[in-house]
Image (cartoon, rainbow, N blue to C red):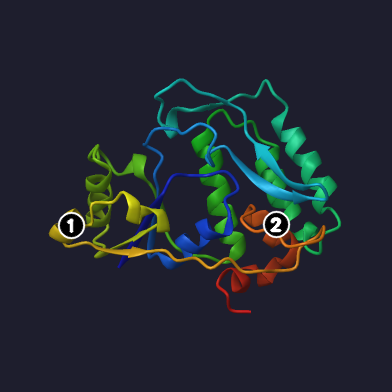
């Protein structure tokens, strides 16, 4: 059994969903420290002027965990995201199919970042057709503070014999520790597909929304490199 673990992100890129798709169990690591100016509260879409950020404003005090970070609803971020998406994707082939999801995200008042991201990830996986079970780290009980021991503990919690790591994990993971614990480590090697987009030359590493707006039901096949 393969388990994968990742911090919950906002409107993640294709590689995030490839990781979910390759795992038998996926754990949303909402109990680690929030990292400012990374992917936990923002992602990019494509516009006629190039990539543009969609950012959820947060209320954050170092060293809060992800599940402790609030959303700053004094800013009209949902209105701004809706207008930006309408302006750049309303004429995309599969706008109508994804529009209800946008309303599910951009209509309710989200008080905290983690529930927003968890909802987004679960719904997008469902829309893609990925059925991997997902769990929150905060629901698993106390976990070790050491990052490697924490991941090993999560793997053992689910009876997994393999941990699927991101490609960058090779730079900092203590692989001997996993071997001693009887957990194999498999590194993700995601090859980003090239697909038809709006607005000129192909731009990689965008939110999965870009793929879904442009390719709808074929998105999972493209994500998997099967088209």
Residue 119 drawn at (x, y percent): 55, 46
Q: Which residue is mark 1?
A: 176
Q: Nearer the viewer, residue 3 or 174?
A: 174
For this orientation, the residue located farthest to the front is 171
Which secondary structure lies at badge 2?
helix
Q: Which quadrant holds the C terminus?
A: bottom right
Q: Is residue 193 left or right of residue 60?
A: right
Q: Is residue 54 above or below residue 90?
A: above
Which image quadrant is residue 215 in? bottom right
The residue carrying pointer 2 sits among few (fewer than 14), some (14 to 19) or many (20 or more) residues within 10 Å by Cα, namely many
Q: Residue at x 66, y 35 (%)?
A: 108
Which image quadrant is residue 92 in? bottom right
Which secondary structure lies at badge 1?
helix
The dot on residue 129 is: none
Residue mark closest to the camera, 2 vs 1: 1
Q: Nearer the viewer, residue 31 or 196?
A: 196
Q: Which quadrant holds the N terminus?
A: bottom left
Residue 182 drawn at (x, y percent): 16, 62
Q: Residue at x 46, y 20 (%)?
A: 61
């Amino acid at each position: 059994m393969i388990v994968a673990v990742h911090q919950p992100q906002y409107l993640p890129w294709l590689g995030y969903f490839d990781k979910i798709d390759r795992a038998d169990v996926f754990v949303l690591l909402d109990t680690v420290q929030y990292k400012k100016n990374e992917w936990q509260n923002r992602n990019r879409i494509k516009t006629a002027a190039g990539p543009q950020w969609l950012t959820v404003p947060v209320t954050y005090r170092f060293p809060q965990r992800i599940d402790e970070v609030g959303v700053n609803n004094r800013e009209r971020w949902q209105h701004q995201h809706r207008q930006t998406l309408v302006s750049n994707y309303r004429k995309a082939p599969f706008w109508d199919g994804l529009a209800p999801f946008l309303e599910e995200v951009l209509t309710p008042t989200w008080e905290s970042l983690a529930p927003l991201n968890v909802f987004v990830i679960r719904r997008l996986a469902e829309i893609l057709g990925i059925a991997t079970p997902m769990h929150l780290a905060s629901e698993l009980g106390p976990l070790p503070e050491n990052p490697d021991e924490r991941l090993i503990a999560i793997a053992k919690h689910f009876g997994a014999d393999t941990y699927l790591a991101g490609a960058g994990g090779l730079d900092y993971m203590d692989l001997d520790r996993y071997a001693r614990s009887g957990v194999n480590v498999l590194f993700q090697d995601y090859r980003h597909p090239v697909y038809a987009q709006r607005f000129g030359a192909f731009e990689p590493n965008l939110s999965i929304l870009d793929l879904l707006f442009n390719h709808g039901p074929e998105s999972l096949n493209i994500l998997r490199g099967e088209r």
